[in-house]
Image (tube, rainbow, N blue to C red):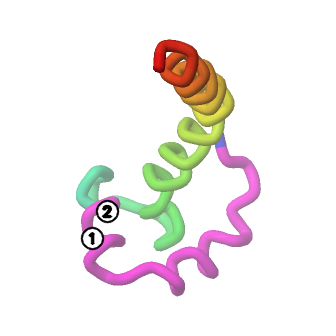
């Protein structure tokens, strides 16, 4: 999980209010710091980063298999 929260304010200022409202609705309204509204966003980003290398390998293998079949 995210340990350093010093950059949360920068991320919050770069995101639209509509998007922040979506992530804010995931959490309850008792949020101690406005930056914690984006914790679900950051968690999804970390999960995506972990899955990306595997998806990339699958894509390359599939592309080679299609090329071989053709």
Cβ atoms at labels 2 and 1 below 8 Å apart: yes
Residue visible at 32% across and 52% down in the picture: 27
Q: Specify the quadrant of the image occupied by residue 18.
A: bottom left
Q: Which mark is residue 21?
A: 1
Q: Nearer the viewer, residue 55 or 68?
A: 68
- Which quarter of the image is occupied by the N terminus? top right
Q: Nearer the viewer, residue 10 or 56?
A: 56
Residue 35 left/right relative to 1 = left
Q: Position of residue 44 (x, y in %)?
A: 48, 44
Q: Is residue 50 above or below residue 24?
A: above
Q: Is residue 33 magenta?
A: no
Residue visible at 70% across and 71% down in the picture: 7
Name the element at disc 1.
helix
Disc 2 from disc 1: Cα separation = 5 Å
**Magenta segment boundaries in residue numbering:** 2-24
Q: Specify the quadrant of the image occupied by residue 17.
A: bottom left
Q: Is residue 8 magenta?
A: yes
Q: Which mark is residue 35?
A: none
Name the element at disc 2.
helix
Q: Nearer the viewer, residue 56 or 61?
A: 61
Q: Position of residue 28 (x, y in %)?
A: 28, 53
Q: Nearer the viewer, residue 21 or 33?
A: 21
Q: Position of residue 10 (x, y in %)?
A: 63, 81
Which class describes the residues within 10 Å of circle 1: few (<14), some (14-19), or many (20+)?
few
Q: Position of residue 26 (x, y in %)?
A: 28, 51
Residue visible at 45% across and 79% down in the picture: 15
Q: Which residue is mark 2?
A: 24
As drawn, the residue found furthest toward the front would be 70
């Amino acid at each position: 999980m995210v340990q350093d929260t010093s950059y949360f304010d920068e991320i919050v200022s770069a995101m639209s209010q509509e998007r922040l409202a979506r992530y804010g609705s995931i959490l309850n309204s008792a949020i101690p710091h406005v930056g914690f509204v984006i914790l679900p966003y950051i968690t999804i980003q970390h999960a995506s980063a972990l899955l990306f290398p595997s998806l990339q390998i699958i894509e390359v293998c599939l592309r080679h298999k299609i090329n071989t079949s053709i």
